Image (cartoon, rainbow, N blue to C red):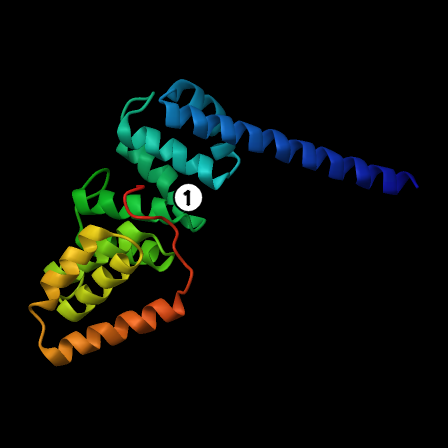
Amino acid sequence: MRRFTQTTLLAVLLLASAAVSAASLEKGLAAYAQGDYEAAMANCQPLADEGNVEAMFCVGQMYANGFGVAMDDAMAMKWFGQAAGEGHPEALYRLAVMHANGWGVPMNDVPAAGFYRLAAGFGYIPAQSAMGYCYKHGAGVEKDLVRAYMWFAVAAENGDFSAAAERDKVADRLTPEQLQDGKDAVTAYLASHEGQVEQVAGET
């Protein structure tokens, strides 16, 4: 009976701890949204240290933008990297942007395209559009207008209107056969990722 009581107590304590963590995260994210970055950091930093993915991303955002702390690309890379390692799509996207712009790391389109691709695979729409640009301009990947068409079309299907315009521009440069290949690739991609939309366009 004593063992059962100990086990039950542990479960209660764990649930209570989880509830406190959830409340702190909610407070931190709400404070961030309201521009109260001191409160956001106070609530999110301890959770980030414990490995909470959303808290890690929030702390990364504050360092990346200089919100409530001195702007620090190295710290932003650290926290985005940890969140990305847990599969956080927007953290992957932010890592791509930092590599593409040389923020905290040497400018390099190859790892940028790699991170964009990973984020796009999670259904993160801005990354899908970014992959279209990568293939359109040969940034970090071999230039391929069919693949560019595919990614722009996928982003467009998920609600990115600017991607729709880019898709149409690319389509004008394709032969009928290439255009059909692109459309087939879009159909195949959407079928294999049905229902997977992590972030609507415009909410980055």
Q: Secondary structure at mark 1?
A: helix
What residue appears at the point 26 percent right and 48 percent down from the top-left corner? Answer: 96
- Rendering quarter of residue 128: bottom left
Outermost residue toward the left in this view: 173
Q: Nearer the viewer, residue 34 or 67?
A: 34
Outermost residue toward the right in this view: 1
- Rendering quarter of residue 193: bottom left
Spot occupied by residue 10 in the image (x, y as percentages of width and height)? 76, 37
Spot occupied by residue 109 in the image (x, y as percentages of width and height)? 18, 53
170 to 160, vertically: above or below = below
Q: Quadrant of the C terminus?
A: top left
Spot occupied by residue 81 in the image (x, y as percentages of width and height)? 37, 44
- Rendering quarter of residue 187: bottom left
Question: Where is mark 1, residue-wise?
Answer: 83
Q: Quadrant of the N terminus?
A: top right
What residue appears at the point 79 percent right and 35 percent down from the top-left corner? Answer: 9
45 to 96, vertically: above or below = above
- Count the labels in the image: 1
Spot occupied by residue 151 in the image (x, y as percentages of width and height)? 24, 62
Query: How crowded is the residue under tag 1: few (<14 C-alpha within 10 Å), some, or many (20+)?
Result: many
Residue 72 at least partly seen? no
Residue 7 at least partly seen? yes
Outermost residue toward the bottom in this view: 177
Going by the numbered disc 1, the residue's amino acid type is Ala
